[in-house]
Structures are given as C-alpha cells and as structure tokens.
Image (cartoon, grey):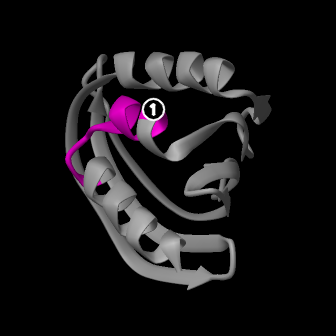
Amino acid sequence: MAESVRIKEMLEYLAQGRIMDAMHEFYADDVVMEEPAYGATVGLAANLEREAAFVASVKEFKHFEARKVGIGDGVSLYENVMDWVDVEGKDIHVEQVVVAQWRDGKIVHERFYYDSAG
C-alpha cells in the first residue's frame, strides 16, 4: 500500500516544518483541501498560496506530533497536535484530525477536522 509509505514521509516533512516542500511533493495538481475556517480550496496553485500565507504568519514552529495514523485503501488519516508562535508573538495550539484521499501516490482530497469556535 503506497499510502503507508507516503503518509509517513509526509508526516516527517511536517514535523520538520517543511510544509511547502510537502505541498509540492505529496499533493496532486487538482487537490481539494477543506478546513472549517476556510471552506474548500481547489487546485494545487490556490492551496500553495493559502499555505504560503499560513507559513508567513508563523514566527516559530515549536512542535508537531502525529499521535495516531490510520491507512486504508486509497485513504489515510492522522490525529495531530501542533504548536507554534505567530508573528505577533502569540502561542498557538491546534489539535486536529486530517483525512486524505490518495491517487497515484498524491493527495487529491484532504479535509481537516478541528474546533474552529475556539
């Protein structure tokens, strides 16, 4: 199952703070990414732009941990915890679940589940 190797590689990129590298390496040109705070973003170019804005808002990545990882036929999911300091000096803590659909070794759909009210 190719997803098992690819998801582990991607999580290593994320743990190293290599978000933009991960986008180029693991996401298909036609990817759709969905987040509670932003809705759906369609296409790799639009998602690269959105992720670049996020990366620019981070002063320091402090921690990324994928606590649980699940892999199925063409799908992966992981529960993670992230901590960072934003450019204004505010500590940010996020806990989320990420579900991805894969095709030909690339993510074609990814959805983030987290509490956006807090």
Residue furthest to the front in view is 104
Residue pointed to by mark 1: 24
Q: Amino acid at mark 1?
A: His
Numbered-mark total: 1
**Residue sitting at x 63%, y 58%:** 114
Work out whether residue 117 or residue 55 is closer to the camera in this orientation and state it. Answer: 55
**Residue sitting at x 70%, y 54%:** 111
Locate residue 95 relative to residue 56 in the image: left or right: right
> Which quarter of the picture shows residue 66?
bottom left
**Residue sitting at x 39%, y 71%:** 5
> Which quarter of the picture shows residue 64?
bottom left
Judged from the image, the secondary structure of the residue bearing numbered disc 1 is: helix
> Which quarter of the picture shows residue 84?
top left
Specify start and end residues of the magenta stretch as a single range.
15-24
Q: Position of residue 37 (x, y in %)?
A: 71, 38
Asked if 78 appears above or below 61 in the picture, the reply is below
Q: Position of residue 103 (x, y in %)?
A: 68, 57
Neighbor class of circle 1 (other Cα within 10 Å; few <14, some 14-19, many 20+) is some
Work out whether residue 95 or residue 72 is closer to the camera in this orientation and state it. Answer: 72
Magenta stretch secondary structure, dominant = helix
Locate residue 40 relative to residue 101 in the image: left or right: right
**Residue sitting at x 50%, y 72%:** 2
